[in-house]
Image (spheres, grey):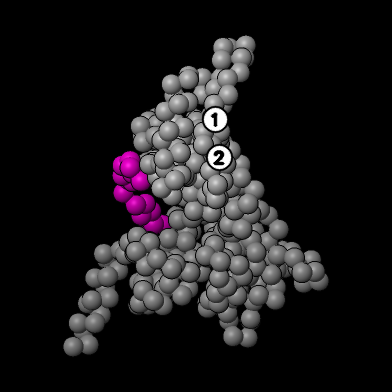
Amino acid sequence: MASIRKSKTTKGYRFYVQIRLEGHPQQSKTFSNLNDAKQWSVVAENEIRKGYFVSIDDAEKLTVANIFDRYAEEVLPQQKSKRQSLSSSRIIKSHIGDYSLLKLSRSVCASYRDKRLQTVSPSTVKKEISLLSRVINVAIKDWGIFLPHGNPINLIRKPTENKSRNRRLENNELDLLLSNSSDFMKNVISLLSETAIRRGELCKIKLNDINFKHQTLLLRDTKNGDDREIPLTKKSITSLTQLINLNPNCKEEPIPVITIKPDGITRMFRNLCLKSNIEDLRLHDLRHEATSKLFEHGLNIMEVSTITGHKDLKMLKRYTHLKARDLLQKIEATNTLV
């Protein structure tokens, strides 16, 4: 049966409802209005007797900030992209962190989306609301937090992303970069544009990962969570050898060939582009360039994915902006054989 206890506070009266039914866990809730307390007690007791009562106490008590903090502590440590997720988490909490999960409605989420679209790209906003959705799903599925209307992100429109980036090296840009580079950056650029590896993979390479005899490189603990072995061209072997010579300590100790952090290499590349008067070129575009060249060399999509590590072939397709003039040469070369 339900019991209601009245207590006086500095802001008025509070009504504490307690429901005890044999064979069911005790349920309780506090109200500032007696009629609300009575109404809830009748509905809740009826639902408990029928076996479909679900408490929303956790959804009322916990805020968006609360579940993001728990997610950062319990889930993120096992993920590769935790730095980016932590950065997005801080932004989300600064905007809607004070909302309780129960009050996190479709309109609140849509307003957050629209406000962010005023200052950042649709791609960034899409990543942020996708993270918000993942965290809410973990709260629902793994932590047992009941939301009466489910995940509100499922009810809002996702931003439409801009056209995929397709920047390729043009004219003499590669020669210009190499001519203005230090020995270190010259070999980094050459290796990235030849192998299509990511900057994070580059910074994890150790001497024992390189098989000079068979000309292969083992990339460990990659972004996708798998190890993968890739072939090395003679140019790649030369670049790796010179990088090793620039850091002789890696021959004696189990340390990476490159000791500079990925962000540091990105900054060095950005400064190099400024020095070379090259606009709108990013370090990641070298992976794009190398991937496209693999297709231009005649490799099929499965062969390329083995080298680049792409598991989603749709994602791989957006990297393969082949140059029409090169394809024409390939077609004409084939026609001469017919």
Dot placed on the residue nearer the N-terminal end, 2 or 1: 1
For badge 1, the amino acid type reads Ser
Q: Which residues are magenta?
A: 154-170
Residue 269 in sight: no
Question: Is 181 within the magenta?
Answer: no
The residue that mark 1 highlights is 3
Magenta span: chief secondary structure:
loop
x and y, in percent, of residue 112 in the image: 41, 32
For badge 2, the amino acid type reads Arg
Q: Is residue 133 shown left or right of residue 205?
A: left
Whether pointer 2 and pointer 1 mark residues with C-beta atoms closer than 8 Å, the reply is yes
Q: Is residue 64 shown left or right of residue 165?
A: right
Question: Is 162 within the magenta?
Answer: yes
Callout 2: few (<14), some (14-19), or many (20+) C-alpha neighbours within 10 Å? some
The residue that mark 2 highlights is 20
Question: In the displayed structure, would residue 51 be above or below residue 33?
Answer: below
Tell me the SS state at disc 2: loop
Q: Is residue 19 shown left or right of residue 77?
A: left
Callout 1: few (<14), some (14-19), or many (20+) C-alpha neighbours within 10 Å? some
Q: Residue 76 versus residue 183: which sits nearer the camera?
A: 76
Q: Quadrant of residue 89?
A: top right
Q: Residue at x 66, y 72 (%)?
A: 241
Q: How many marks?
A: 2
Question: In the displayed structure, would residue 151 be above or below residue 338?
Answer: above
Question: In the displayed structure, would residue 71 be above or below residue 60?
Answer: below
Q: Residue at x 48, y 19 (%)?
A: 33
As drawn, the label of residue 166 is: none
Q: Residue at x 43, y 49 (%)?
A: 51
